[in-house]
Amino acid sequence: MGTIVLSGTVVLVILGFGNHTWWLAAVALLFVYMQYGRGGASASSSGGSSGSSGGSSGGGSGAVPGSYRAYRDRRDKQARWDRRYRRERPLESRRQTRER
């Protein structure tokens, strides 16, 4: 994925010599890639490294982004956010349940 993004950025920079708007597109592409493309992998690896000190007997499965442990962590985090949202905004959560 990184190779495709870098190739696309180079193409946009080359096109930018004729029209500077392409340079803005190249910067936007790099920003989105750094924010969402690599950001997800680095966030999960940093989360896995912080939990690896206590769970070293688990075989280090928390460091693998596609592992079941990472999935469970994301699912539990989403459930916590959902509960918090329902607790802090009871009217909105009731409205959503009625619409379903």
Image (tube, grey):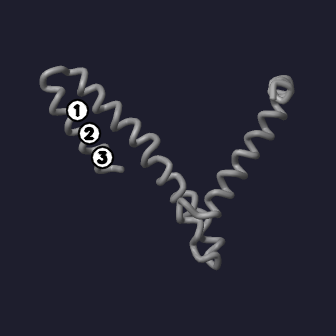
The residue carrying pointer 1 sits among few (fewer than 14), some (14 to 19) or many (20 or more) residues within 10 Å by Cα, namely: many
Q: Position of residue 24 (x, y in %)?
A: 28, 25
Residue 49 location, quadrant: bottom right
Secondary structure beneath dot 2 equals: helix
Cα separation, mark 2 vs mark 3, equals 6 Å
Secondary structure beneath label 1: helix
Closer-to-camera residue (87/8): 8
Provide the residue designation for mark 1.
12
Image spot of residue 52 (x, y percent):
59, 69
Left or right of 61: which side holds 84?
right
Vertical position of residue 94 compared to residue 65: above or below: above
CB within 8 Å, label 2 to label 3: yes
Closer to the N terminus: mark 3 or mark 1? 3
| 51 sits left or right of 33 in the view | right
Q: How many marks?
A: 3
Amino acid at dot 3: Ile
As drawn, 88 above or below 74: above
Q: CA distance from mark 3 to mark 1?
A: 12 Å
Amino acid type of the residue that numbered disc 1 sits on in the rendered structure: Leu
Q: Nearer the viewer, residue 28 or 55?
A: 28
* Mark 3 lies on residue: 4
Percent of width and height locating residue 48: 57, 62
- Is the residue under label 2 in contact with that under label 1 (CB below 8 Å)? yes
